[in-house]
Amino acid sequence: MTRVDNLRRIALTAIPMALILAACSSATPEQTVVVVTGAPDEGATEATALPAEIPTAVPIAPTPGSGDPTLIAKVNTAVRSGPGTNYPVYAFMSGGQTATLAGTNDSGTHYAIVVTVASTGTGWIDAQFADISNAGDLAIIEAPPPPPSTSFSPPAPGEPAVVAQESLFVRTGPSEQYPAYGTAEKGARGAVFGVDETLQWFTVRLDPSVVGKGHGWVQSNLVETENVDLEDLTVVEAPAIPERVAPPEVAPGDPKATAVDYVNVRTGPSTNYPAIAMAQPGGSAGVSGKNSDGQWWQVIVGTSYTPSGLAWVNAGYVVTENTENVPVVEAPPPPDVAPPPSGTTACVLVSQSPADATIVAAGTSFNMTWTFQNVGSTTWDENTTDVNFVAAAGGVRLSSNDLLDLSTSVKPGEQYSVVVPMKAPSSNGQYGETWSINENNTSFCQFYNIIDVSQ
């Protein structure tokens, strides 16, 4: 795209203001004050520090005030989401850099510091790589649960790719304000097809049977690149930050889940179900069940979000109370899977309206709008490219059209909106349709919508 030449000159040191605001508004975890004596056990954590040159891209921590409890990095080291190498990296601290000390884990092997690059406002440093001052009695901060893992789609030979330098978050959008699908392990290689407008985040392909959208975002300063020329990458527009869920208050003693990071609230227990909202760190909801493997909790969100008032959150992003006896709940039918963008003819979904899981009154007519970006290398020719109906969930149609012609050709990098008139059925329930974009009768981009019908 023509914007890439200008975007390449944007310094990778820019901090989005939203990250600073998110850190300032983060909830403070409950803390118990204890006295910590002696040095941490040096054999209990990472064996080595980072090399002399580290890919630090942003200032990660506010400068401590005079007399504040302070951590000083002795060497270059990673700032992680939890106290251990099984947690992904937020960013890196350079040797000599300082941060405000927030506490320690219960074994004293890691320190928690105040950072601007985490949605919770807290990151973790291996204690053997840090000195502390003005600490006094350090708070013991409970370690968050290790987040779940996810996998990149492997690149084809010669295809642009990224390689994770450390365990890192794969997020639903290009900032820490977006929830994560999971983490990619150090050394993981993934196909990349786009970049955000700041050049700080790459868009990578994900397995659509695991992540329904088929793509996610990783920080550019946490990966190495292979066969990547920024001029050949599409600048992908960031999706809208999800609405923050406001569930009913949980009664004392009832089963409860509390988010430890931004987490998607979904219609079913996996990342290929659509997200209906987002829980923020510290937000709580009642728990009504769990899935068969215990990796997802069914939570009470209220009927303003789903007809049943129920939804699902990943167990890797919440801590729970009083959930020992909640029942195993059967998962709803999963949505259709869309293939990831690939090849010379490819697309990525930029936005849709109404969003998945929107409640629509029975019998109401509405326009379903999907907006796509051509992320391939060839033009979608209006004479040979069509938008086609594929299937309806449960065999119940929402639309009466089977085929729509493109109104104009769409060049690589350009966006195009598809508008399909639909009508909600007369009976309550969850409905949806799958559509595709076809080039010469060959499908290269499949997409769907889901609505909740209520009287």
Image (spheres, rainbow, N blue to C red):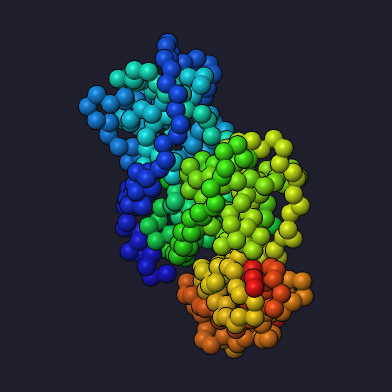
Q: Is residue 173 above or below residue 440?
A: above
Residue 146 place in picture, x, y as percent: 58, 36
Residue 422 place in picture, x, y as percent: 62, 81
Q: Is residue 372 left or right of residue 272?
A: left
Q: Quadrant of the N terminus?
A: bottom left
Q: Is residue 27 above or below residue 233?
A: above
Q: Nearer the viewer, residue 139 or 351?
A: 139
Query: Which residue, as the protein is rendered here, is positioned at the far left?
Result: 66
Residue at 32%, 56% in the rendered image: 10
Q: Is residue 367 left or right of residue 233?
A: right
Residue 431 place in picture, x, y as percent: 69, 71
Q: Is residue 93 left or right of residue 279?
A: left
Q: Quadrant of residue 144?
A: top right
Query: Which residue, as the protein is rendered here, is positioned at the far top?
Result: 38
Residue at 33%, 64% in the rendered image: 6
Residue at 58%, 57% in the rendered image: 302
